[in-house]
Image (cartoon, rainbow, N blue to C red):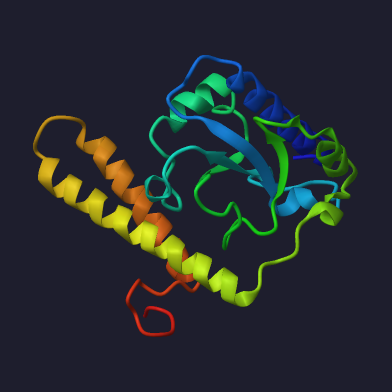
Amino acid sequence: MRWTTAARQLEKVAAGCAHAARLPFLGLRVEEAWVHGRLLGPREDDVPDGAVAVALVCDAARDDVPWGRAPAGAQHWLGAAGLATLPVAVVFRSAAGPVAGHAVQRPVRFWSREDAVDEDVLRAVRDGDAERLRPPAPEPERAAADLAEEARVSLAALRRASADYREHRWGGGSPVARADVLADVVAGWLDLLDAGAAPPGAQGGRAS
């Protein structure tokens, strides 16, 4: 994907967020949109798929937004905002926790429900000059604490999804949908382990 094309995709995300904010209640409320990763510069001629990386901050409780799993209502919101078919890597984050994390490093906000689209950020992205807008990296202690909390949320979600799958696998509803939830939270949990998270209650070091 050309850099200019990627920058236009980010502009479409901003427009979609603004559009969804004007619609009647969609079941999930997105408060902010942040860009992270390659589009924050420096500019490249071409960027790979997934380079348009966006974190959407929503009103769901933190325990309902484990890493790697979209909260309830997310697909409906993405469809209404026109983001479902865009070549954009989207992750959801709870407004009750930090936006940044092990895979969302030093993000920059480009839209919010309160302040609308930040044209300065979109211009900086187009120019390949958005690095100057990025906040400093958190102190190691803060980053470790945030990763530990992310692991707590993820493991709790994994236990809930596993129990729900076992209890309802042969009952009503779609077993495929339950399996998809379980697969998402397992993948998120493994990603956190790869990032160095220790299971809650573990004494020091990374899980083996």
Q: Is residue 70 above or below residue 148?
A: above
Quarter of the N terminus within the rendering: top right
Q: Is residue 95 above or below residue 11?
A: below
- x and y percent of residue 92 in the render? 52, 43
Q: Farthest residue in the top direction?
A: 24
**Quadrant of the image occupied by residue 140:** bottom right
Q: Report the label total.
A: 0
Tell me if 55 is positioned left or right of 51 in this view.
Answer: left
Quadrant location, the C terminus = bottom left
Q: Quadrant of residue 206?
A: bottom left
Left or right placement of residue 185 versus residue 56 in this view? left
| Residue nearest the viewer, comparing 43 with 189 | 189
The answer to whether one can see residue 169 in this image is no
Q: In this view, does 2 lie to the left or right of 60?
A: right
Say which residue appears at 87% left-offset and 43% top-offset: 124
Residue 135 in percent (x, y) is at 75, 58
Whole-percent x, y for residue 19 in the image: 64, 19
Residue at left 81%, top 37%?
122
Is residue 143 placed above or below 65 in the rendered structure?
A: below
x, y percentage for residue 82?
A: 59, 22
